[in-house]
Amino acid sequence: MNAQQIKEKAKALGLNCDVPTKRSLIHAIQITEGNFPCFDTAREYCDQDLCCWRTDCLAPRWYDQAHLEVIKEELERLTKLTIRPALLRDFHL
């Protein structure tokens, strides 16, 4: 949902749209709708499959986690390249 759609939803619920962050506004909407204000709090998993915020809420974390996995794999590869010559040198002594 884009910023305009979020503000329209908030206005339709009678909420003040002058809040400091998208997260705060969505929390206000969730509370007004009788839901737990959980937007942007999940860690890798969310059991709320029907939540209208799900895509916005989880996408950044899943992307960050995938990016961290790529970095971790590259560091492991580079570490092996760096350690291997040292092991070979010690082996020949």
Image (cartoon, rainbow, N blue to C red):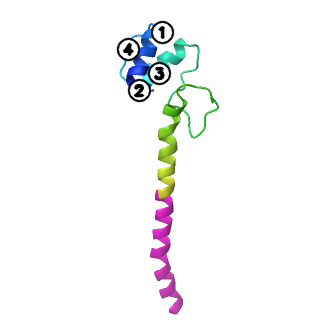
- Between 6 and 85, the one lying in front of the other is 6
**Kind of element beneath mark 4:** loop
Question: Residue 77 magenta-drawn?
Answer: yes
Q: CA distance from mark 1 to mark 2?
A: 17 Å
Question: Neighbour class for label 4 at 10 Å: few (<14), some, many (≥20)?
Answer: some
Q: Which residues are magenta?
A: 71-93
**Kind of element beneath mark 2:** loop
Mark 1–mark 4 CB contact (< 8 Å):
no
Q: CA distance from mark 3 to mark 1?
A: 12 Å
Query: What number is the disc on residue 2?
Result: 2
Query: What number is the disc on residue 26?
Result: 3
The spot of residue 41 in percent (x, y) is 52, 31
Name the N-terminal-most of marks 2 and 4.
2
Name the N-terminal-most of marks 3 and 4.
4
Query: What number is the disc on residue 47?
Result: none
The residue labelled by disc 1 is 13
**Kind of element beneath mark 1:** loop
